[in-house]
Amino acid sequence: MLFLFRSGAPSHDVGVDLGTCNTLVHVRGRGVVVNEPSVAAVRRSDRSVQAVGLEAKRMLGRTGSDMQAIRPLQGGVIADVDVAEAMLRRFLRRATPWKMRRPRPRLVVGVPSGITEMERRAVRSSAEAAGAQELYMVAEPIAAAIGIGEPVDTPVGTMVVDIGGGTTEIALIALGGIVADASIRIAGDVMDRAIVLHARRQHSLLVGDSTAELTKIGLGTAILEENPRVMEVRGRHLVSGLPRAIEMNSTEIGRAIHEAVQAIVAAVVRALEQSPPEFAIDIVDRGIVLTGGGALLPGLPELIHRRTNLPVRVADDPLTCVVRGTAAILDDLERYRMVLRT
Ligand SMILES: Nc1ncnc2c1ncn2[C@@H]1O[C@H](COP(=O)(O)OP(=O)(O)OP(=O)(O)O)[C@@H](O)[C@H]1O
Ligand SMILES: [Mg+2]
C-alpha cells in the first residue's frame, strides 16, 4: 500500500549542514527552511529532547534542575548520538512536513573531511532515524566550494578554508576530490573558551559561553586595530559574587583569541605546503576563499593574505555555503556523484 503511493509521488530532496554551532536544512524548491543553533534541551530525568534550536539555546547555561541544554556536536563531530538524532529528526520534521504516504527524502549531509567510521555511523543512524531514504555524505569543504559556485569537477584547483565552530577545514579541491587538506579542531568555539578564560583571569568576571561568543562577534579581531572597539560585557564578579558589567576592548579580545587565530593560519600554510606544485598557478591566480562563520572575524582575510601573499576573499554569506552546496548537489546528482560518499 505504502509502496504504491511512494512510487508515483515526487521525492523531497533535503540538504543538511549539521554543524557544531548551527544546523541548516535546505528543501528543494523552498530554500533554507531551518537555520538554527545545534542545541537541544534535554530533560534530565528521562533524557528526552524537549526543544531544539534557538529555543534550546536560550536555555544554555540558564536552565533549571531538570532541564539541560546540550550541544550534541563537539569539535565538528557527533559527540552525543542519541541527542543529535533527536535534534536532527525534529529539524527535519519541521522542514519537511511530509506525510506517511509521501516518499521519504533523499538527504545530502555535509560532514567533516576527516570523519571517522564511527562518526559516519552516527550520521547514518541519525539520518535513518530522521526518515531519510537515501543518504549521501559530502566533505564539508567540497560542499562549501560547490555552494559558492566553484568549478570543483574540473582540473582547476580551488582552495577553500571553512572556519566553523568546531573545526577549521582547509582543502584544495580538483576533479571532485581533495588534493591536499588540513583539518584542525580549532575554530570559533576555542576562541569563545579563550574569552571565558580571559574574562576570568584579567577581570575576575565569570561569563557564560553565549556571552563569550557575543563578545567575540562584537570585539574579535585577527589583527590589531588602530581604533579599538569597546563593549560592555556582563557576567558575575568573582570577588563580590554579584552581577557586573565590565568594559572590554578589541585589543584584549584580539590577544585572547590570538593563539587560535595563529593555529588557523598555520594550518592554511601547512595545506599550501602540501599542495602539489601543479596547482600553484591556480592558487596564485584564484586565491583562497574563506567560508563558515569564522570567515567573518575582522582582519582574518588580511592576516592570511599577509602570511601567504595570496589573494584571499570571504565568500558571500559564508554561514550558508555548505548547505547551499548540498542543495546544488541534489539539483544535479549525476554531475556531482564523484564527490559523494554513500
Ligand atoms: N562576525 C563573526 N565574527 C567571528 N566569528 C563569528 C562571527 N559570526 C559567527 N561567528 C562564529 O562562527 C561560528 C559558527 O560558524 P558555522 O555556522 O559556519 O559553524 P558550524 O558549521 O556550525 O561548525 P563546524 O563547521 O565546525 O561544524 C561560531 O563560532 C560563531 O561564533
Ligand atoms: Mg560548518
Image (tube, rainbow, N blue to C red):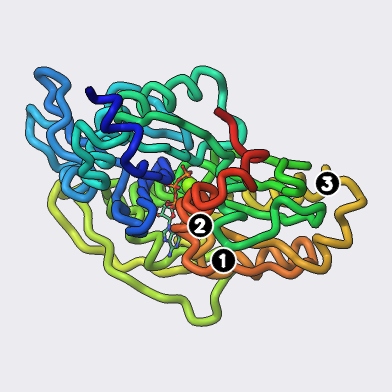
Q: Amino acid at mark 3?
A: Ser
Q: Nearer the viewer, residue 193 or 182?
A: 182
Q: Nearer the viewer, mark 3 or mark 2?
A: 2
Residue 169 occupies quadrant: top right
- Assign the C terminus to one quadrant of the image: top right
- The residue at 34%/47% (across/down) is 200
- The residue at 35%/26% (across/down) is 126
Q: What kind of element bears circle 2?
A: helix
Q: Say whether marks 2 and 1 touch (CB < 8 Å).
A: yes
Please give the residue where the numbered disc 3 appears in the rendered image: 275
Which residue sits furthest right? 277
Q: CA distance from mark 2 to mark 1?
A: 8 Å
Q: Amino acid at mark 1?
A: Ala
Q: Nearer the viewer, residue 52 or 296?
A: 52
Label 2, ligand 1: CB separation under 8 Å: no
Q: What kind of element bears circle 1?
A: loop
Residue 79 occupies quadrant: top left
Label 1: few (<14), some or many (≥20) within 10 Å? many
Label 2: few (<14), some or many (≥20) within 10 Å? many
Left/right of residue 106 with respect to residue 40 in the rendered view? right
- The residue at 27%/68% (across/down) is 232
Please give the residue where the numbered disc 2 appears in the rendered image: 321
Query: Which circle's residue, 3 or 2, is located before the other in the chain?
Result: 3
Please give the residue where the numbered disc 1 appears in the rendered image: 315
